[in-house]
């Protein structure tokens, strides 16, 4: 359940980042690119913190948490790159 909530949060943050990029693109043409890059970097940090919490607080091993990190990070990040490439 926690993984699903993180994925939803990732897509909501992606929507906010792309919306901000689109709003600022009238004055700064590269705003959507900057918003996408900033989102991917920020999401990697958030996913890493989630992994750290799973290892340090919940007692999982790194090998147990690594696939979850890859899932939580890669799905929204791939969506961000795809949307930037095809839509914006």
Image (cartoon, grey):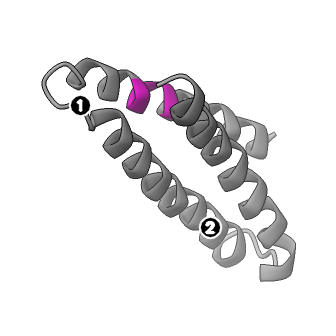
Q: Which residue is mark 1?
A: 29
Image location of residue 34, percent across then percent down? 32, 45
Compared to residue 53, the image places residue 85 above or below, namely: above
- How many neighbours does mark 2 have within 10 angstroms: few (below 14), some (14-19), or many (20 or more)? some
- Left or right of 13? Residue 74 is right
Report whether residue 4 is seen: yes
Report the quarter where the N terminus lies. Answer: top right
Residue drawn at 69 percent across, 39 percent down = 7
Residue drawn at 54 percent across, 27 percent down = 12
Chain-order first, disc 2 or disc 1: 1
- How many neighbours does mark 1 have within 10 angstroms: few (below 14), some (14-19), or many (20 or more)? few
Query: Secondary structure under badge 2?
Result: helix
Q: Place residue 81 in its image quadrant.
A: top right
Report whether residue 9 is seen: no
**Mark number for residue 75?**
none
Q: What secondary structure do most residues of the magenta stretch adopt?
A: helix
Looking at the picture, tell me which residue is in the foreground, 76 or 3.
76
Image location of residue 79, percent across then percent down? 65, 37
Compared to residue 73, the image places residue 13 above or below, namely: above
Q: CA distance from mark 2 to mark 1?
A: 38 Å
The magenta span reads 14-18
Between disc 2 and disc 1, the foreground one is: 1
Image location of residue 44, percent across then percent down? 54, 60
Query: Secondary structure under badge 1?
Result: loop
- Left or right of 42? Residue 23 is left
Image location of residue 80, percent across then percent down? 57, 38
Q: Which residue is mark 2?
A: 53
């Amino acid at each position: 359940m926690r993984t699903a909530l993180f994925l939803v949060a990732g897509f909501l943050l992606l929507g906010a980042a792309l919306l901000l990029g689109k709003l600022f693109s009238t004055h700064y043409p590269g705003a959507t690119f900057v918003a996408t890059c900033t989102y991917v970097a920020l999401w990697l940090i958030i996913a890493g913190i989630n992994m750290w919490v799973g290892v340090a607080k919940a007692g999982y091993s790194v090998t147990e948490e690594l696939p979850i990190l890859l899932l939580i990070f890669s799905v929204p990040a791939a969506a961000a790159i795809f949307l930037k490439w095809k839509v914006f």
